[in-house]
């Protein structure tokens, strides 16, 4: 069955709607309000026009300054208002890097991918600059008051920084954690062919099996990554709602307004 959340574009990966998810009190997230994606650094004119017509007015770029410098979002002159909101000051998720740079590490340490990504997810909870970036994303969401007008937020692959952004947004809107987990892990299905192609490329280049699998871990999402972040939230804040308030500095009024804007 076709997944209506997945927006298939030729020049951008992992573009997905957050509309339609049901909250625990019976509301639904509005369509044409919240989009998550990978980089818009290669977006072509046709796809950009599609996003404009879809209602996208905010392009929130969660990548680091170096990632943006290397591959800038191609949205100049469009209806998309570009906002630079880096979660990390460098690309900690390793997603925009050339796999060759990691060859030595991934050959020598079979657990590198898993250990590294769990650490990255913990940092997204424990590091104040990361939390500040997520706070800023919520402030942008609160500016998006017009009907059928979307905020699109993205990193490089649209899976880690973007994935945790979606976790926080859906949690704030009152979506249950099982549904949030399904949205998070959907990345692996959506970009399965891309992941397989990348893994095949490194195998062809002579990487060992465990090095190739290390890179597969880095290119994918994994419930262990998400659990590492959730464990950190539990340890430091007790509950997700406490984290939204005390970690991301959202007031009850912020969350109420968010629900008014994004739920039916």
Image (cartoon, rainbow, N blue to C red):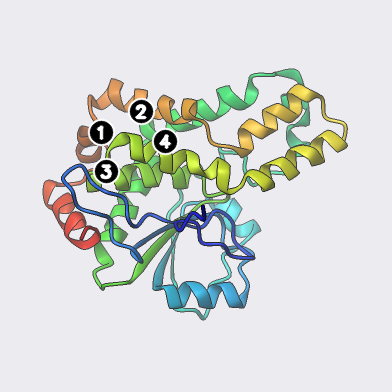
- Residue at image mark 1: 240
- Disc 2 to disc 1: CB gap under 8 Å: yes
Locate residue 234, reporting x and y percent.
Answer: 29, 23
Residue beneath the point at 49% across and 79% down: 78
- Disc 1 to disc 3: CB gap under 8 Å: no
Residue nearer the viewer, 39 or 2:
2
Label whose residue precedes the other's in the sequence (2 or 1): 2
Label whose residue precedes the other's in the sequence (1 or 3): 3
- Residue at image mark 3: 175
- Residue at image mark 4: 124
Q: Is mark 1 on a helix, strand or loop?
A: helix
Label whose residue precedes the other's in the sequence (2 or 4): 4
Locate residue 213, reporting x and y percent.
Answer: 70, 27
**Which of the two marks, 1 or 3, is nearer to us in this view?**
3
Locate residue 86, reporting x and y percent.
Answer: 46, 50
Q: What element carries label 3?
A: loop
Are there few (<14), some (14-19), or many (20+) residues within 10 Å of tag 1? some
Query: Position of 98 compared to 154: left or right?
Result: right
Query: Position of 219 compared to 226: left or right?
Result: right
- Residue at image mark 2: 230
Locate residue 35, reporting x and y percent.
Answer: 42, 59
Residue beneath the point at 64% across and 19% down: 111
Residue beneath the point at 20% across and 52% down: 27
**Which of the two marks, 4 or 3, is nearer to us in this view?**
3
């Amino acid at each position: 069955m076709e997944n209506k959340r997945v927006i298939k574009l030729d020049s951008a990966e992992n573009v997905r709607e957050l509309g339609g998810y049901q909250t625990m009190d019976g509301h639904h997230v509005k369509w044409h309000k919240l989009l998550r994606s990978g980089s818009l650094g290669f977006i072509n004119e046709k796809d950009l026009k599609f996003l404009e017509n879809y209602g996208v007015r905010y392009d929130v770029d969660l990548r680091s300054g170096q990632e943006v410098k290397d591959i800038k979002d191609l949205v100049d002159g469009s209806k998309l208002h570009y906002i630079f909101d880096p979660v990390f000051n460098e690309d900690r998720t390793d997603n925009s890097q050339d796999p060759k740079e990691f060859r030595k590490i991934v050959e020598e340490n079979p657990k590198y991918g898993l250990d590294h990504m769990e650490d990255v997810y913990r940092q997204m909870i424990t590091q104040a600059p990361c939390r500040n970036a997520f706070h800023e994303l919520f402030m942008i969401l609160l500016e998006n008051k017009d009907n059928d007008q979307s905020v699109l937020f993205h990193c490089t692959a649209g899976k880690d920084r973007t994935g945790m952004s979606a976790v926080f947004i859906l949690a704030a809107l009152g979506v249950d954690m099982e549904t949030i987990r399904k949205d998070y892990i959907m990345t692996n299905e959506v970009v399965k062919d891309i992941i397989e192609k990348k893994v095949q490329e490194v195998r062809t280049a002579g990487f060992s099996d465990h090095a190739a699998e290390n890179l597969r871990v880095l290119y994918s999402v994994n419930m262990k990554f998400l659990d590492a972040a959730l464990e950190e939230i539990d340890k430091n804040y007790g509950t997700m709602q406490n984290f939204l308030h005390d970690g991301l500095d959202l007031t009850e009024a912020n969350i109420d307004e968010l629900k008014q804007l994004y739920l039916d």
